[in-house]
Image (cartoon, rainbow, N blue to C red):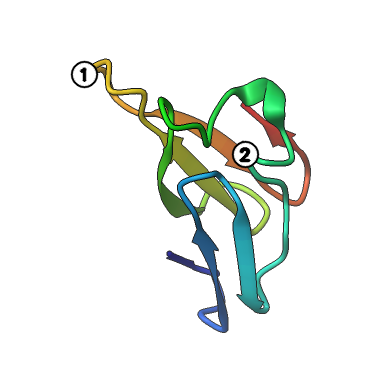
């Protein structure tokens, strides 16, 4: 779960990469909506979400494939959704 910058809403993410918006949180993409990212699967689940403070009221999804490396990050914001 990640709060919006205003504190008047939040995003909730599931392990399949689906993003749910509450309050003033806007939807800016998800792992489910971007199958080319290859996240949200049994072998590469989404393990977290955070507010993207450096972009236009967006969020960052984190996926971990169990390789031992740092989780991959996927940025979603008002300007664009990108890996």
Assess disc 2: are there few (<14), some (14-19) or many (≥20) residues with their C-alpha within 10 Å of its C-alpha.
many
Q: CA distance from mark 2 to mark 1?
A: 21 Å
> x and y percent of residue 44 in the render?
43, 28
Tag 2's secondary structure? Answer: loop
Circle 2 is placed at which residue position?
31
Instruction: Pick whichever of labels 2 and 1 is earlier in the sequence.
Output: 2
Name the quadrant containing residue 36. top right
Quick check: 42 left or right of 6?
left
> x and y percent of residue 39 in the render?
54, 30
Name the quadrant containing residue 71. top left
> x and y percent of residue 16 in the render?
53, 44
- Furthest toward the right, the residue is 79
Residue at image position (52%, 36%) is 40
The label number, if any, that marks residue 68 in the structure image: 1
Residue at image position (27%, 15%) is 67
> x and y percent of residue 53 in the render?
51, 53
In the image, residue 58 above or below residue 72:
below
Residue at image position (71%, 46%) is 29
In the image, residue 13 above or below residue 47:
below
Placement of the C terminus among the 4 image quadrants:
top right
Placement of the N terminus among the 4 image quadrants:
bottom left
Tag 1's secondary structure? Answer: loop
Q: Do the CB atoms of the residues marked 2 and 1 lie less than 8 Å apart?
A: no
Residue at image position (56%, 51%) is 59
Of residues 55 and 51, the one nearer the viewer is 51
């Amino acid at each position: 779960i990640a709060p919006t910058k205003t504190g008047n809403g939040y995003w909730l993410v599931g392990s399949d990469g689906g993003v749910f918006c509450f309050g003033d949180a806007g939807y800016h993409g998800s792992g489910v909506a971007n199958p080319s990212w290859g996240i949200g699967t049994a072998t590469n689940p989404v393990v977290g979400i955070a507010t993207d403070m450096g972009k236009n009221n967006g969020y960052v999804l984190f996926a971990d494939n169990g390789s031992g490396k740092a989780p991959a990050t996927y940025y979603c914001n008002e300007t664009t959704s990108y890996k």
